[in-house]
Amino acid sequence: MDISVVGGVYKEICGWPSHSAVLGSAGRAALCLSQLDENIDVKLFSKISESDETGLRKGFAFNSNCSLELEYTDSTVSFDYFHPLSEPKINNNQSNKSLEKFTPSVGKEAHCVLFGMIETTPMVNCKTLIYDPQNTYSPVLLSDAGCKAQTVIYIVNENELNILTKKCPQEFVSVEDKAKWLKTTENASVVVVKCGRFGAFVLDGNSRGWVHPFKTDTVFPIGSGDSFVAGFAYYWLVKNDTAIVAAQKASVVTAYYVSHKTLCNHKDLDDYGQQLIELREAASEKTVYLAGPFFTLAELWMVNEAKYFIESFGMEVFSPYHDVGIGSAEQVVQKDIDAIHDCDVMYAIFDGNDPGTLFEIGYARSLNKPVVVLSQNPKSEDLKMYEGSGCCIVDDFASSIYLLSWISK
């Protein structure tokens, strides 16, 4: 089978952990598809700067079943992340006038995976169209973009769904209701809504249901949505699985990708999926005690960043800095100790042997409270007591927040 992938190829730069690639949404999806099955032929249609073509082709050097049908533009858009959970800084997206009215030569009998682009929505007319808008702030309906296909599948995130369905009746408030409205309005065969830690909701002509995510030891979330779309396209188009089964297997694809930053053959992926733990419940609504020093600008920045992302995962945070403040021992110690008693789990930022953080971790473990320790530059002896007392020690910020969310009360 031939699968055409159309959309943006972008530079991706992450500060911590260090990551640099020329892939973007369509590039990664094409690479994932070619890695899943060497017997399918994948064509990638995109526009990039001529100077970045070599970097893109290096990524496909070992995937002979993928051909790159490239056109050149003024400059390649880049996404700069401080860390994988942070909002990226998008550069060069104002200068690509040559990307307007991008109409790749995809045949009318083609099976196509279409990604919306920052600069435009590519124009395609094909047999099967799997569409991911890739635009959190201003996604475009296929009917408005002028794209046509005999069979249409929407794969959107929850925020995109809310924007795309802003014209639906006000009583349509749930993900399920809005997905149904989108399916009917756009005459789509399937609508899949990616809902992050809650998994994905799938609606097709015969069934509906939720697909759960999986727990992994590490999580690199940049590109996780692209790998999900690629996995769904493969199992739905090539393997003829139902939409729900295809989404379930796409969740396995995503788990492999976020823990390996690449993919493997679908046969090896089947074995990998047997080892995974399915997360049937979203992150529990628990109270997290946020331990860590806050006496320098860098320390305070880290505490603020941790608080923001822990709360974004649906957890409540007690932060000594934010909830008690800086004061004398008489003013702060008992309040902090009471909060440790009341919390469900502790998240500790441990770099530099801060005595207050050391005490808080030890006190929490004496109460048998679960503790997640983020430690990026420890000495070999620094973590001995934490390892021996059952703390979960992680050296990657994004992975530590996911792990924290998965711990039960």
Image: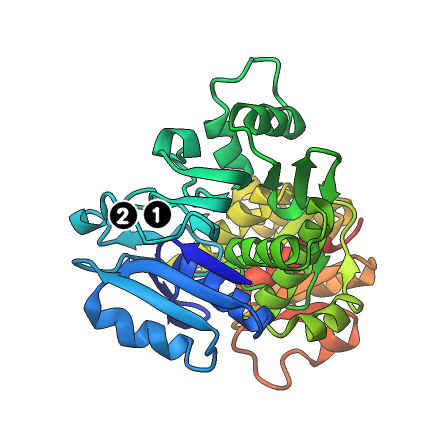
The x and y percentages for residue 58 are 37, 79
Residue 400's tag is none
Q: In the picture, which quadrant includes the N terminus?
A: bottom right
* Horizontal arrangement in the rendering, residue 325 relative to residue 74 (left or right): right
Whichever of labels 1 and 2 marks the residue nearer the N terminus, that label is 2
Establish if 102 lies above or below 261: above
Q: Are marks 1 and 2 in contact (CB under 8 Å)?
A: yes
The x and y percentages for residue 351 are 53, 71
User: How dense is the environment of label 1, judged by Cα within 10 Å: few (below 14), some, or many (20 and up)?
Assistant: many
Establish if 25 lies above or below 194: below
Query: Most extreme residue toward the bottom, as rendered?
Result: 380
Report which residue position mark 2 lands on: 102
The x and y percentages for residue 205 are 69, 33
Query: Most extreme residue toward the front, as rendered?
Result: 109
Report which residue position mark 1 lands on: 117
Query: Most extreme residue toward the top, as rendered?
Result: 170
Establish if 122 lies above or below 356: above
**Front residue of 259 and 352:** 259
Please give the count of numbered marks on the rendered protein: 2
